[in-house]
Image: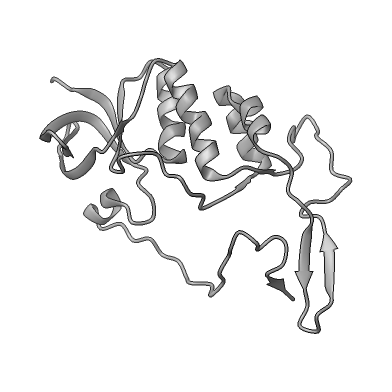
């Protein structure tokens, strides 16, 4: 049976890029598509946790991530009476160990994290396809037939696997009727959250 690629990855955020890098270094063919026409320029998350740093080390980008980011600043918590308390996000006396080689989280915005990962993917001889949207797919006993749309029109891609890394509003998840349970916490975060918007 003929396939265009082994893996079609829909969504080129951090999750899709991580998968693509890992497949690239293992010699597995893939196509990485992203419906947006250009990289995401914002940041839905700035905290790189110590265990994630271990993954970045394995992918060969941990030094670049550390150089692009920095430690978390002190946290200022304001109380209802107007007083405030300064504290560190992590304990000051936590040090790297053999079991946990990265002791503290790294502050690095999402757009910078993904830029480093795209650079690594390019070094491995691959690139992603911006402005390419998954519009439908059918699965059979041997693989997946996917329809993708670009400026030039629609094309069909035959893959052994389709993996949806396309976020909370995932087209893949909705098409498969997979629920995304959760709850609204009623908390809003802003760029100033770590300095002045928390109350006890």
Residue under the point 25% across and 58% down: 177
**Front one among 48 and 111:** 111
Residue under the point 78% across and 78% down: 79
Q: Is residue 19 left or right of residue 81?
A: left
Residue 14: give x, y in percent of width and height.
47, 39
Residue 78: give x, y in percent of width and height.
77, 73
Residue under the point 65% across and 44% down: 49
**Front one among 180 and 62:** 62
Residue 164: quadrant of the picture: top left
Q: Is residue 149 left or right of residue 44?
A: left
Q: Quadrant of the C terminus?
A: bottom right
| Residue 16 to residue 169: above or below | above
Residue 29: quadrant of the picture: top left
Residue under the point 33% across and 61% down: 179
Image colouring: one colour
* Residue farthest right in this picture: 93
**Label tally:** 0
Q: Quadrant of the N terminus?
A: top left
Residue 157: give x, y in percent of width and height.
16, 30
Residue 144: give x, y in percent of width and height.
18, 35
Q: Is residue 6 left or right of residue 53?
A: left
* Residue farthest bottom in this picture: 81
């Amino acid at each position: 049976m003929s396939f265009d690629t082994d893996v079609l990855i829909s969504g080129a955020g951090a999750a899709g890029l991580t998968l693509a890098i890992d497949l690239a270094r293992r010699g597995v063919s893939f196509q990485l598509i992203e419906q947006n026409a250009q990289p995401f320029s914002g940041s839905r998350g700035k905290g790189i946790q110590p265990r994630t740093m271990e993954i970045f080390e394995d992918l060969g980008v941990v030094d670049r991530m550390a150089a692009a980011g920095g430690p978390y600043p002190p946290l200022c918590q304001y109380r209802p009476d107007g007083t405030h308390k300064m504290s560190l996000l992590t304990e000051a006396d936590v040090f790297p160990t053999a079991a946990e080689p990265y002791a503290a989280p790294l502050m690095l915005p999402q757009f910078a994290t993904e830029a480093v990962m795209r650079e690594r993917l390019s070094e491995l001889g691959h690139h992603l396809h911006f402005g390419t949207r998954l519009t439908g797919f059918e699965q059979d006993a041997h693989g997946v037939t996917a329809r993708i749309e670009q400026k030039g029109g629609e094309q069909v891609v035959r893959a052994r696997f389709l993996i949806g890394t396309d976020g909370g509003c995932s087209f893949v998840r909705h098409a498969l009727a997979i629920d995304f349970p959760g709850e609204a916490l009623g908390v809003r975060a802003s760029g100033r959250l770590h300095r002045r918007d928390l109350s006890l």
